[in-house]
Amino acid sequence: MTPVRGRRHNARYSYQAGKGSVKGKRHSKLISPLVALIATALIGSTQPSFAELPPYAYQQMQKAAPEYLEIEVRSVRTGRASDGIEVEVEAAVTGVRRSASHLRQGAVIRIRYVHDTRHLIGPGPIPVLEKGKKYPAFLRRDPKEKVWRPAAMGRSFEVV
């Protein structure tokens, strides 16, 4: 190939991007990593991010909880909330390990909380309790609404 007058011939790249030309190979080498990068970014962005608190954080919350009870769930009512599922549980106290409000075995309490369905970074969601099952419960009393609330976030109904 003779160089065009006024232009220098570049031996590294062919002026024709045909089969086997250097220019065509260079182009395919750039596209492959670019496609992989875009695919990884798209797949990674569709997966929810989870960042659970470490176990010692839940242990501290459980130790600080004013109420540490054993409960048996009698009924569960659920409803919609802006950030998840609103849950109201009626439970019988079957055992008292610690109680700042002087609860006794046989008492019936109402527990109200929101089960978060957004999967945000931070503490795990509080589980929706099941009727008829027994749970350990780390709670605090809400004097305004006369209900109990979970005191150890997502680990309020299990011992860590």
Image: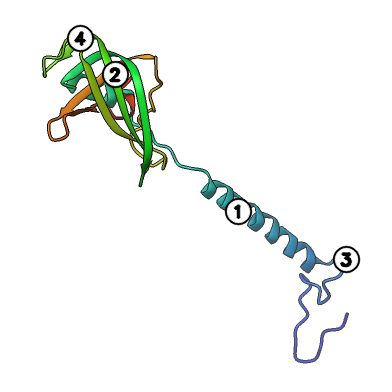
Give the mark, 2 or 3, whose residue is nearer the N terminus.
Answer: 3
**Amino acid carrying mark 4 in the image:** Arg
Q: Residues within 10 Å of mark 1 (few under 14, many from 20)?
A: few
| Labels 1 & 4 near each other (Cβ < 8 A) | no
Instruction: Return the mark for residue 71.
Output: none
Residue 120, quarter of picture? top left
Q: Is residue 1 above or below residue 160?
A: below
Instruction: Measure how far apart labels 2 and 3 are at the Cα level.
Output: 76 Å
Residue extending farthest to the bottom is: 5
Which circle, 1 or 3, is nearer the viewer?
1
- x, y percent for residue 124: 37, 32
Secondary structure under the numbered disc 2 in the rendered image:
strand
Q: Looking at the picture, which amino acid does disc 3 mark?
A: Lys
Q: Work out how far the residue at label 4 is from the one at label 2, CA to CA, in angstroms.
A: 16 Å
Mark 3 or mark 4: whose residue is earlier in sequence: 3
For disc 4, the marked residue is 97
**Mark 1 element type:** helix
Q: Nearer the viewer, residue 73 or 14?
A: 73
Camera-nearest residue between 78 and 68: 78
Type of amino acid at the residue the image marks with label 2:
Ala
Query: Which residue is identified by label 2?
Result: 91
Q: Amino acid at mark 1?
A: Leu
